[in-house]
Structure formats: C-alpha cells, structure tokens
Amino acid sequence: MECKTISNVIFHTIQHLLATDILSTAYRIGNTFTRKRKLGFSNLFLFLLRQYEKSLPINLLDFLEEFPQSGISSISKQAISKARKGIHSQAFAELLTLSHTTFYQLSKHQRTWKGFHVFAIDGTSLQMPHTKKNLEVFGYTSNQTGVRFPMAHASLLYDALNDIILDARLDTCHYDEREAAIGHLKACSCFSLPEKHIFVLDRGYPCRKLCKEFLKQNRLFVMRVKKNTPSITNMEGKDGLIWYGSNYPKKHRLVLRALRIPFDSGEEEYLLTNIFDTHITWEMFRELYFLRWPIETKYWELKHRFQIENFSGNHPISIRQDFYITMFLSNLVSIIKKDTDRVIEEKTKKSAKECHYQTNRGMLINRVKKYLFQFLSSTGENESLWEQIFRAAIKTRSQIRSNRTYERKTKYTRRRHHTNRKLC
C-alpha cells in the first residue's frame, strides 16, 4: 500500500530529527532544553503531537502509561505548560512541509485537472481563548455591547484534488487575506511542488498587487471577481482580454483574460485569469473554478472534526503549536485515506448494489490520533497497526451521495456543541 510507504517515511524522518537533536537545536527558544532534565525536547514534542481533547493532567497520565521508556515517573502540569513555551511553533510547521513534500515525491496516484494540480487559497476566522495576551497579539472583534472577542485570521494553500495542505498561516484577525495569499506564493518558492499547477481564488482576492505577483513568479491563476468590476462589466462577449488595474498611470494596468460564466439560474459570475490558451474555453473554466470547493469543506473538517478552536493552551505560542499540529495530522489522514478508499472500493465493487463508499473520515481521524504515538515510538513497520486501521475503515465506511445540492444559508447560529457532530 502506497500510504504505508509514505507514512512510514514521515514517521522515520521525525524519529531521526528527534534522535539527532536537529529539531531541538533549530527550534528551541532561548536557552531552553540545553540542560538535561527529565522532560526533554523529544518527550515534550511527542506529548504535544498526541492532541487528545482531554484535560492536561489526564493527557499526562495517559502519556506516562503509554510511554514508560521515557523514564519520567511524574511531572506537574505547570512544568508542561512552562516547557512548551520553549518550542517554536515553526518546529511543527516543518512537519507540515515534510508531509506534503513526501507525498509529492512518493505518490504515484495524484489527481490532476487536464494535467494541472489545482491549488486553492482561502481564509477563515478562528476564535481564540479569551485572555489579555491574545487580545494584544491577535486582535479582536466586538459585539453591540462592546464586549471584545479575540479572533485570528487563518489562511491555507491547499491542493484541492489531492486533499493536501501545502502552507498554513495564522495572523491577526484584521490581516489582509491578499497579503496572506502573497505570503503563500513566496512560501511556494521554498517547496518542491509539481511543475504544472493553477491557483484558484474566490472573489475577495483580486487586486493588481496580487495579480502582478502571480505574473512575476510565472504562475497561473483563476480568480472570481465582483460583478461591479468596471473593466469586466463593460466587456463585450463571454471571453476576452481586458486592462485590469488603475488607469493612471497606464503602466499600472495589466492585460488579463476575463470570462463571463452563466449559471442555470440565469445569473452570471466573472472570472479573471492569466491563462490565454484559447483551447481552454469558458465552459472548462467554469469546471475549474468549482474545483476549489474542497477547501470550504476542509475548513468545516478542521473546525468540527479536528476541533481546531479547542486549543490545549491559552498562550499564543501554544495556540500556534496546536494550529500546525492539526495541519500535519490533517495531511496524514488524507494520505492514509487514499489507500483505505481503494481497499473499500475493491471490497465493494463486486456487490450487486450500485452504491459507492468511502472511508468514514471521523473514524480515520480518531484512529490516526490513537495510533500516532505508537507509530512514532516504534522502529518497526507496525503491520498490526495498519491492519487495524484498514479493518476499521472497511467496517465503518460511509456511502457517497453524489450530486446533492442544498440551499445556502446566510445566517448561522454559533453553537459550540451539536448533537450530530462529536469529537474524533
């Protein structure tokens, strides 16, 4: 199975980085972890990766029972809280980079659109723990009574067809999402990405600065623009070239391709792109734009399945650590799901029923969290653990219901707990 190979490479790489003190040397803050103590960098790093939504004392007891070779008999929760402030969150961001780099290097079953990988960029808001420090670091929004709520802006660069997060950012709540997109583009220069790819963005992103950055880096993009954009509303026909940007001075304007995309309801949406190949028609662009939708469902998964806003600490350093750990776990689940889906397809293709099934993602998230520590603390291939994961995937599969449509709701009542959405 391909997922075993990719995942085992990731696990063995993490073990090597911890054993050789590469991570501790590069990402410790100040002079922390320089003296030998019973709670070292490696033990704390593994403890934080467990990501169980339990209280800290219970997590600590479970960790000591599961990992007796750590040599720790007892430790206080205050020591854990203090020690984790000595690990830079970038250490866990490196795991995110490791996961998608290994996937692209080793995976032979990568989904594309006409030979192009489809990379979506989008942002969302996350509610932070209510502390004075978070109000200062992340900023806040307020309600009609003046009560302040600390919030942050998260942004993802996401492979929509392969369900892989490439880059993630956590900024202040009023951070410009266009600047976040530029940050993703700059990060791409450090990654080993597939050569042929297209970036797809929603209507909040179009601006001359971002378009110029795409052109500067010679990267293809498709953006949805607002209906009141003058240069497009005055365009004749469904497909043509326009001047985009300020009229003064003229050198600020860019030559781009604009398209009018009609919908079944009779409404029109407008797209902006630097793909000038006439063989790619407006009907194909309509298909391409809608391929960005998985990033919306990815945010739903991160918030409801992974409970990303249920942070294990209140300090900004702890919050950023949890944020990148969740991104890494999401990629790990996606890598494993590709093979479990293939196993389910093989088991059910002989059935007389015409139903199609896939892995129950909530179950898989739970199994990955449950066995992650055992994968990272073992030197073998862990065939028994993989067998348990595949057996559970086949047993608790979910039916795929295609072509379902729902009326879009414009108002949502914010609820912390839902009867049909439980922790994984």
Image (cartoon, rainbow, N blue to C red):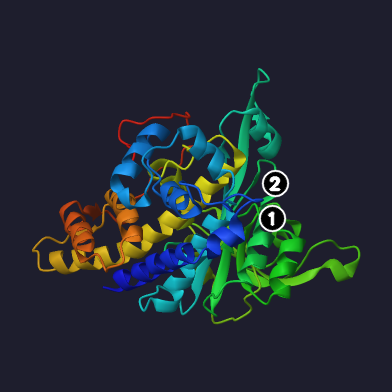
Image coords of residue 351 (percent x, y):
9, 64
Image coords of residue 313 (percent x, y):
52, 36
Q: Which residue is drawn at 66% across and 28% down?
A: 132
Number of marks present in the image shown: 2
Within-10-Å neighbours for mark 2: few <14, some 14–19, many 20+: some
Name the residue that disc number 2 marks.
175
Front of the two marks 2 and 1: 2
Give amino acid for label 2.
Tyr
Question: Dividing the image into 4 quarters, which one contains the C terminus?
Answer: top left
Regarding mark 2 in the picture, which secondary structure is present there? loop
Mark 2 to mark 1 CA distance (whole Å): 9 Å
Q: Which residue is drawn at 39% across and 60% down?
A: 332
Image quarter for residue 253? bottom right
Q: Which residue is drawn at 49% across and 50% down?
A: 40
In the rendered image, the vertical position of residue 119 relative to residue 409, given as above or below:
below
In the rendered image, the vertical position of residue 88 relative to residue 291, given as above or below:
above
Q: Is residue 122 in view?
A: yes
Image quarter for residue 126? top right
Regarding mark 1 in the picture, which secondary structure is present there? helix
Question: Dividing the image into 4 quarters, which one contains the N terminus?
Answer: bottom left
In the image, farthest residue toward the right: 249
Q: Residue 178 carries which label?
A: 1
Give amino acid for label 1.
Arg
In the image, farthest residue toward the front: 36
Q: Is residue 265 in view?
A: no
Q: Residue at x 62, y 71 (%)?
A: 190
Image coords of residue 10 (percent x, y):
40, 67
Q: Nearer the viewer, residue 278 or 77?
A: 77
In this rendering, position of residue 341 left or right of residue 257: left
Q: Which of 344 and 22 is in front in this view?
A: 22
Image coords of residue 402 (percent x, y):
30, 56
In the image, farthest residue toward the left: 352
